[in-house]
Image: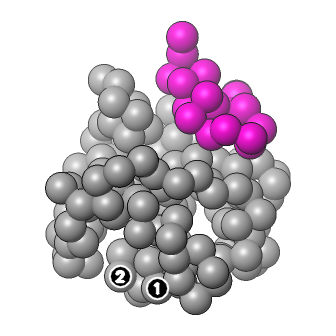
Amino acid sequence: MSLLDTIGKQISGNAPLNNIDGNQQGALLRAVSGLISKSGGLSGLLSKFHQNGLGQHAQSWVGTGENMAITGEHVQQVFGADQVRQVAEETGTDPGHASSLIAGILPRLVDKLTPQGKQVTDTEAHTGISQLFSGGLGSLFGQK
């Protein structure tokens, strides 16, 4: 099973991820990192989700239990059409697909950045994101 198939299965209810090459994967990670940065870091991101009625979802990503899934519509709600459109441009896909990609990756990314269910500082999160870049999307889904 390919990495993209695995990611597609992780994103229940969303369009399958296909035709995303290594360059697009890197662009997607950079774009999602940019969304976190534009949100005011990890703490700002979590706050944004709380403000948009999705606090329980965001807290599940930080906690040690199961990560609650979000949809592309949730991504649009939290980040807005302009930011999603920018991610779509950066990754060479359409905004609907970009929303689904973000929805599939963001919970895993926050989960990886908050080990043992503890929120980290924004500096620690930034360092964690940098380390994940070297591993690509496979590092988010337990693959090498």
* SS under mark 1: helix
Q: Residues within 10 Å of mark 1 (few under 14, many from 20)?
A: some
Give the number of the disc on residue 43: 2
Residue range in magenta is 1-19
Asked whether, in this view, residue 124 is left or right of residue 84, the answer is left
Please say whether residue 71 is visible from this viewpoint.
Answer: yes
Give the number of the disc on residue 38: none
Asked whether, in this view, residue 8 is left or right of residue 122, the answer is right
Amino acid type, callout 2: Ser
Q: Residue at x 62, y 40 (%)?
A: 11
Marks counted in the figure total 2
Residue situated in front as seen by the camera: 53 or 79:
53
Please say if 20 is above or below 125: above
* Spot occupied by residue 112 in the image (x, y as percentages of width and height): 30, 51
Q: Quadrant of residue 102?
A: bottom right
Q: Quadrant of the N terminus?
A: top right
Dot 1 and dot 2 residues touching (CB under 8 Å): yes
Residue highlighted by disc 1: 47
* Spot occupied by residue 19 in the image (x, y as percentages of width and height): 70, 28
Please say whether residue 80 is one of the residues in the magenta stretch: no
Q: Residue at x 32, y 61 (%)?
A: 63
* SS under mark 2: helix
Please say if 126 is above or below 49: above
Give the CA separation, mark 1 to mark 2: 6 Å
Q: Quadrant of residue 137?
A: top left
Q: Residue at x 54, y 16 (%)?
A: 2
Amino acid type, callout 1: Ser
Q: Residue at x 58, y 41 (%)?
A: 24
Please say if 126 is above or below 51: above
Please say whether residue 12 is one of the residues in the magenta stretch: yes
* Spot occupied by residue 38 in the image (x, y as percentages of width and height): 49, 82
